[in-house]
Image (cartoon, helix red, strand yellow):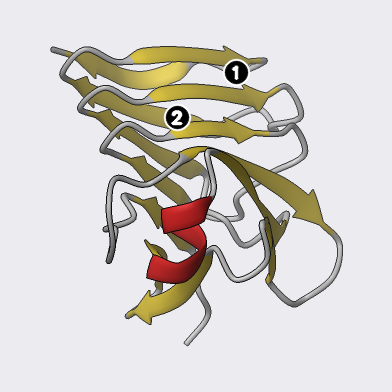
Amino acid sequence: QDVTGINIYPPCYGSDPPRTQFSIIPTSKDIITVSSFPAELVNVTSSGNVLGFGFLKAASDTATEAGVVIEFPARQLQSLSVAGSSDVQLLNGFVPTTGSFQFDVKDSSSTFANFSDLTEGTIIEATGDGSIDALIYSNVGFGTIDMM
């Protein structure tokens, strides 16, 4: 089963996690690649068709700032959920083949998403809850925006 979603709400298996920037980059490759600084900062999990992350104790205990880069097939990503106090940027170039993209931001997360390359008829469904900071650029209309 293909992974079509990303859930960024990484639990920490040590002390408080470092301030971490997650960058999601579209790729034309058919594989998902995850890299981090420092190395071995997160473990990657999969539940159904959703990719998830958890901070590893050794790296998260010593890092003060960190970054995770996720290269994801541009036509495969259909949903992004962000929670906790995550900082996430979704770079331009994702074009879901289903005609819609589900975008959900919660808690005290900061998220930037650029959907400037979507095809006409694609709908973005955006929801938010908590003291979030979400900036979404799009060249097409939103289906619903529900920010609490």
**Marks 2 and 1 in Cβ contact (< 8 Å):** yes
Q: Nearer the viewer, residue 91 or 119?
A: 91
**Quarter occupied by residue 133:** top left
Establish if 6 lies above or below 88.
below
Residue 50 percent coordinates (x, y): 39, 68
Residue, x 46% and y 42% (percent of image)? 100
Q: Is residue 131 left or right of residue 28?
A: left
Task: Using the rendered image of the protein, determine whether residue 12 is visible from the camera's viewpoint.
Answer: yes
| Vertical arrangement, residue 118 with respect to residue 36, above or below | above
Q: Residue furthest bottom?
A: 1
Horizontal side of 128 relative to 49 (left or right) equals left
Residue assigned mark 1 = 140
Residue holding disc 2: 124
Q: Quadrant of residue 47?
A: bottom left
Please, what is the three-letter code of the amino acid marked with disc 1?
Answer: Val
Q: Position of residue 139 (x, y in %)?
A: 67, 15
Q: Nearer the viewer, residue 49 or 24?
A: 24
In this orientation, which residue lies closer to the viewer: 6 or 57?
57
The relative height of residue 90 versus residue 111 in the rendered view (above or below) is below
Q: Classify residue 27 as left or right of residue 113.
A: right
In the displayed structure image, the side of residue 91 where residue 87 appears, left or right:
left
What is the three-letter code of the residue carrying label 2? Ile
